[in-house]
Structures are given as C-alpha cells and as structure tokens.
Image: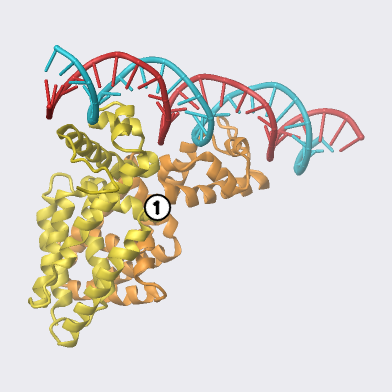
Chain colours: A orange, B yellow, C cyan, D red
Amino acid sequence: MTTTAPARKPTRIQQRNRRAILEAGLEVFSRQGFRGATLDQIATEAGLSKPNLLYYFPSKEAIHVTLLTQLMTTWLDPLRDLDPEGEPVEELLRYVHRKLEMSRVFPRESRLFANEIVQGAPRMAPHLEAELKPLVDETVALIESWIAEGRLARVDPRHLIFSIWATTQHYADFDTQIGVLMDGRDVHKDAAAFLDMLFRRLLTP
Amino acid sequence: MTTTAPARKPTRIQQRNRRAILEAGLEVFSRQGFRGATLDQIATEAGLSKPNLLYYFPSKEAIHVTLLTQLMTTWLDPLRDLDPEGEPVEELLRYVHRKLEMSRVFPRESRLFANEIVQGAPRMAPHLEAELKPLVDETVALIESWIAEGRLARVDPRHLIFSIWATTQHYADFDTQIGVLMDGRDVHKDAAAFLDMLFRRLLTP
DNA sequence: CCACACTCTGACCAACCGGTCAAGATTTTT
DNA sequence: AAAAATCTTGACCGGTTGGTCAGAGTGTGG
C-alpha cells in the first residue's frame, strides 16, 4: 500500500467523468483561451453540473494545466523520433508529414498550444524551458552534423524547425481562414504535396 | 455640410483619447483575446477612467471591431502591391520580406489577427469573405499566369500564400516560444536570410 | 466674462464568474 | 440489506465585469 498519498485506483465513474471533462476542456479552451472559457461552458459540454465538475478537478486552472502537460509530451514525440542513422532529407520530410497529419487529426490540441503561446505562455513557460528547449537543442545539433557531412543543404537549423512548425500548424490554427479561402477543396492532400516540394527543394544539398 | 449624421470634426482631445484607447486596446486584445481583455485593463493602459473610455467608444466590442477593421486594410496592402509586370520570383520574395518586416514592426497587430482567427473569426468573418477572399483569388490568378508563362516553378498558389503567411507571422505570434529557443540571437536578420533561401529555392523554375 | 458644448468621474447596477457547502442520491462493499 | 464510500446537486457567496447616469469640471468662441 502506498503511504503518503491515498491514491486509490480510480473508479469507472471517475475515469469516465475525468475523461469527459478533459475532452470538454480541450474543446472550449482551444477556441476561447483560458480567460475566455467558463466553467459553465466546460461543464455543459461535458454533460455535468458545475459543482460536479469541481468534484473531479479542484479548479479551472487544474483542468488547463492537466491538458497542457498531457499535450507537451505527445506534441514533441515526432521530433524525438528523428533517426540520426536515417537519410537526412527523408527523415526531415517524414517529420513534416507527421506534423501535418497531427494538425489534421488533433487540430484542437494545436489551437490549445497556440492560444497559450500567443498569450505569453503564462502556464507553460516552465515546460518550454525544461522540455522543449533541450529537445530543440539536441535536434539542432543533429541537423548541424548532417549539414557538416554534406548530406543536407546549409540551412539555419532553428529557423528550419520554426518554418516546419509554422507551415504545418497553420492548417489547424487558422482553419477558419483556410475554410473561407479553400471552400470545398481537399486541403490536406494538396498541403502535403506542397510542403513536400517546399522542404525537399530547400533541404536537398 | 453633411446631412444625416452630425459628424462634427473631432476635437484635439477626441483625437488624442480615441488614439490612446485604440493603442491600449491593441496592446490588451492582442495578448488576451476579446473575452480575456477587460475594459478596466484597457482604460488603465490608456490613462483614462472606465466611464470616460465609454464616452469615446460605446462598448468593448466597438473598440475591437474598430481595430479589426483598421487592421484588415493595412494587413492586405503588401499583397495588393504585387506587380504583375515585375520579375515573378523577385516580386514574391519582396512580399515575403515585407510580411516578415511587418511581423517585426507590428507584432501586436499580427497577434490580434491570430487571436481572432483561432477563435473562429466571430467578428471578422464578413471581412474575410468581402475583402480577403477576392484579393486572394486575384493573386492566385496572377501566380497561375506566371507559372503558365514558365517564369515560376509549378506550385499550388494558395498553399504558397498560406506558407508565406505562416512562416512570417509565426515570428510575431509565437515570439514567446521563439524567445525561449533563441535567447540573445538576432532573430529577424537570420529569419530573413532563411526565408529568402526557402522561397527562392521553391519558386525558381 | 459668460454661455454653451465638451469632457470627466464617483456611485451604482444587473449579470456573470469561479468556487463552496450541506444534504440528498447512488453505487459499492460487507 | 445495512453500512460505507462515492457521486451529484441546488442554493449560495464574494468578487469581477460591461455598462449607466446624474452631475461636476473644463475649455472655448463670442
């Protein structure tokens, strides 16, 4: 038996309701931002009353922080999966396509992240320093070694990473705008082809 | 003399205070979004009392709408300035550099726009349809004609425009993240060189 | 210097917000 | 089936928010 923390294993009801709350929080926070979202919105979306919601999470902030922490891990996974032994251009293009696919499948997560950063990352700054920064530094070193070996065109690794993030996440974060400008077209299929060409031309030595 | 509307010419005090309010509104809305911003914040930032602020603008929404409307015009100007008679690659690169420069000089305007779009463009959707869409359609036609003449690589014009917006505005909208990852470096100078290379390689036939 | 339009403010209001609480309903354990 | 643990809710609370209003202050043209 664990000592200090009670830490009973969660009930089925707990699992269901906590999951529903996080799902609802993602929906609402990703569109409204932290201050713009209300507990009533989240509770309604989750199919619970407000006091009941606060039975499962101690505060609005706790829901937000839980979502951001969960997000950080899955968000960075594709970057961790770059294979130093692989073919550099193909590895980076695989990363581009994975990021674009995440924009298609998890647009709300992308917007949650965007909202947090645009507003100055008040609740995420520690995560950026502790998790994102070292991982980016590693990746920069890897790309630099590829360039030194002449297997990649000479590009600034940091700005390369920024441009991949920017172009792929754009399809999730600005989907409203894109919807206006691309009515009816198959956005993501064309986007994949375009980004492939963009980064292939850039990176090929 | 104009008839229906009184439309006296604005006093010096009116000019000064309306300007101060819009400046303050830009500062606050661009970081907090519409719902996250409060009239007290804006009033304090503008150096006015809240009732006095509401003497110059009838509501919080009126300030926001005024900012968005003003923004739309200046935001699209660089796109209007593409010269059909110019050298295609150089014209588009000039557009890239102007957009990047706007991210450097007007980061708050960029974030104001980003906030509005991420949240589903509730107050801007009409502007997007009426102003942005026709201008983009024109530009797409221009780029397609350049491609048909063989003066530009075969790229999807719409996704080209998206990628220019995404990469340049990223430096304003995500400046918090970039600050963490680029401590001390001269971000914009390197960004200009990087984006020049990125789009030159893409666009050169 | 006076009349008049313009500018500004403190006090106030109703609606909304995040969060609490006591008590009742429901499920699980024994 | 009773006891215990878990779950749910209506009523409520203090603070905040967008907005109002009557009246006081101020600048200015005649």
Q: Position of residue B204 (x, y in %)?
A: 13, 79
- A167 up-or-down from B140: above or below: above
Q: Position of residue B129 (x, y in %)?
A: 34, 65
Identified by mark 1, the residue type is Gln
Residue B172 or D29: which is nearer the viewer? D29
Residue B57 or A7: which is nearer the viewer? B57
Query: Residue at 22% of width from left, 73% of height from top?
Result: B139
Q: Which residue is mark 1?
A: B119
Q: Position of residue A55 (x, y in %)?
A: 60, 35
Query: Residue at 7% of width from left, 76% of height from top?
Result: B86
| Tag 1 secondary structure | loop
Query: Residue at 34% of width from left, 69% of height from top?
Result: A181
- A198 up-or-down from A28: above or below: below
Locate the C terminus of chain B and report the quarter of the image it occupies: bottom left
Residue C7 or A4: which is nearer the viewer? C7
Q: Chain for mark 1?
A: B
Quadrant in the rendering for residue D24: top left
Drawn side of residue B125 relative to residue A61, left or right: left
Q: Position of residue C16 (x, y in %)?
A: 51, 36
- B51 up-or-down from B112: above or below: above
- A37 up-or-down from A136: above or below: above
Drawn side of residue A78 relative to residue B15, left or right: right
Quadrant in the rendering for residue B155: bottom left
Residue B150 in view: yes
Residue B50 or A22: which is nearer the viewer? B50
